[in-house]
Amino acid sequence: MFETALILLYLTTVVKTKEEGVYFKVRENHFLVDEKTVWDQKVDSLLSCSQICGRRYDCKYVNFKKDQGICSISDRQSSGKVVQRKGYFYLKKVGYLSKWLITSIDYQAIPSAGTTRQVAVSSCQILRSQSPIPTSGIYWINPKGESQANAFKSYCDMETDGGGWTLVWSYTFTNYSRFTSKSNAITPRPSWSVKSNVDVPISTTPPLNETDFNAVNFSEWKQLGSRVLIKSNINNWLVCEPGTGSFVNWKDGSMSCQIVKRVTDTCNMTLAPSKFASSKGYGPMFYSTGYWNSTYYYFDGFTRNNWPTHDPCGKNRAKHLKNVGDPHGNIYIR
Ligand SMILES: *[C@@H]1O[C@H](CO)[C@@H](O)[C@H](O)[C@H]1NC(C)=O
Ligand SMILES: *[C@@H]1O[C@H](CO)[C@@H](O)[C@H](O)[C@H]1NC(C)=O
Ligand SMILES: *[C@@H]1O[C@H](CO)[C@@H](O)[C@H](O)[C@H]1NC(C)=O
Ligand SMILES: *[C@@H]1O[C@H](CO)[C@@H](O)[C@H](O)[C@H]1NC(C)=O
Ligand SMILES: *[C@@H]1O[C@H](CO)[C@@H](O)[C@H](O)[C@H]1NC(C)=O
């Protein structure tokens, strides 16, 4: 549990009687994130900081940065969130109270966003606004909202291209070593709508890491954002923004894609694809001119025809990285 304490200041110079004082609720290693104006003052201790606030009738709360002795005071009622942050104290003025009322105040530390079902965030993107930005890992998210029962654990990538990405699909291949055989496909597949003969299993279990081969219910992807990050350890990584086409809305058309990481040197002059097709074959594809001659990624989910193109040359050929031990790919949304 977090340390909580109560400071009582007797402000004999300011207040009329010795029985009155200023009470603060104190949280060590906590910080109030608030966009509203605060002003900073350098002080020698937490006590001095609380005294400054105590003497000002208009001071509502204080953030104190211990190592630098910075006392940040605000006169507004806080609207922000209290988050964990090492080396800080958050003091909230409880009021000008009489001594005997202390015991009636309840101190409960507030967990930081995304760390429990109760404080689930709507997507990993929301966590990016926290300071400091949390590390990549598993967080509770609730894209649908409505009820806490809808929250689930999800993996967030907080590093690639600025972070804030929610992992929605981790896949592998049914026959990687015979990549271009008809039996090769991605597996499992998300619950998107494709031809009925697509036969790899459907997953609606959120993946907890990049090799936990599962998928978030496809109908929830659009609640997480509209940008797509495609990662694979056998082809270059892409970030695509919707144009006339949109992956999450399952709409064919243009997309504005960029290569954010090169996994292979092969065809390192080739540009990212520029178009999206949801179901020309047995799954969605990213391509640039013709469906079957310029494919960069094709998520083929049928084990009796086609193969799942991962071509850094963007020509629908088998130019992916070979002999990779744990070949896989991931899709993230932001
Ligand atoms: C992989 O492809 C080869 C060649 O087509 C085939 O003989 C083999 O059965 C396939 N393996 C699987 C697991 O589908
Ligand atoms: C990925 O998640 C699965 C399922 O929770 C777990 O079994 C596996 O150990 C995890 N792998 C890594 C590398 O974290
Ligand atoms: C996926 O989400 C949709 C819409 O929220 C819902 O109707 C459907 O039952 C879900 N599928 C599964 C398998 O949870
Ligand atoms: C492409 O790869 C070649 C050979 O590996 C390398 O010499 C060249 O600098 C690379 N070009 C770019 C634009 O990265
Ligand atoms: C693919 O085919 C189309 C015609 O269907 C053609 O316009 C385009 O230039 C071809 N692209 C490549 C990369 O060969």
Image (tube, rainbow, N blue to C red):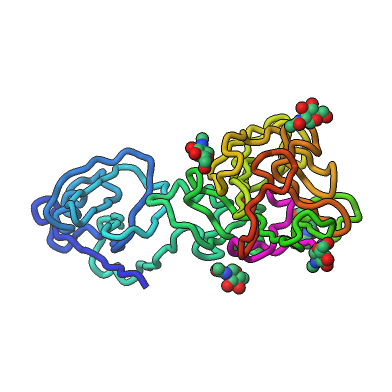
Given residues 317 and 211, the one toward you in this image is 317
Residue drawn 17% across and 44% down?
A: 41
Residue drawn 69% across and 59% down?
A: 171
Q: Does the stretch in magenta take in 216?
A: yes
Q: Does the stretch in magenta take in 158?
A: no
Please, is residue 312 above or below residue 275 in the view?
A: below
Quadrant in which the C terminus is drawn: top right
Quadrant in which the N terminus is drawn: bottom left
In the displayed structure image, the side of residue 321 where residue 293 appears, left or right: right
Q: Residue furthest left?
A: 13
Please, is residue 253 above or below residue 105 in the view?
A: above
In the displayed structure image, the side of residue 203 where residue 305 appears, left or right: right
Given residues 38 and 246, the one toward you in this image is 246
Could you tell me residue 119's position as x and y percent? 52, 60
Please, is residue 268 above or below residue 115 in the view?
A: above
Could you tell me residue 9's position as x and y percent? 17, 60
Q: How many marks?
A: 0
Given residues 270 and 105, the one toward you in this image is 270
* Stretch of the chain drawn in magenta: 200-221
Residue drawn 84% across and 41% down?
A: 280
Name the chief secondary structure element in magenta: loop
Residue drawn 15% across and 46% down?
A: 42
Q: Is residue 53 visible?
A: yes
In the displayed structure image, the side of residue 277 where residue 74 appears, left or right: left
Q: Is residue 147 visible?
A: no
Q: Residue furthest right?
A: 197
Could you tell me residue 92's position as x and y percent? 30, 55
In the displayed structure image, the side of residue 178 where residue 42 appears, left or right: left
Could you tell me residue 254's position as x and y percent? 71, 31
- Within the image, what quadrant is residue 244 found in? top right
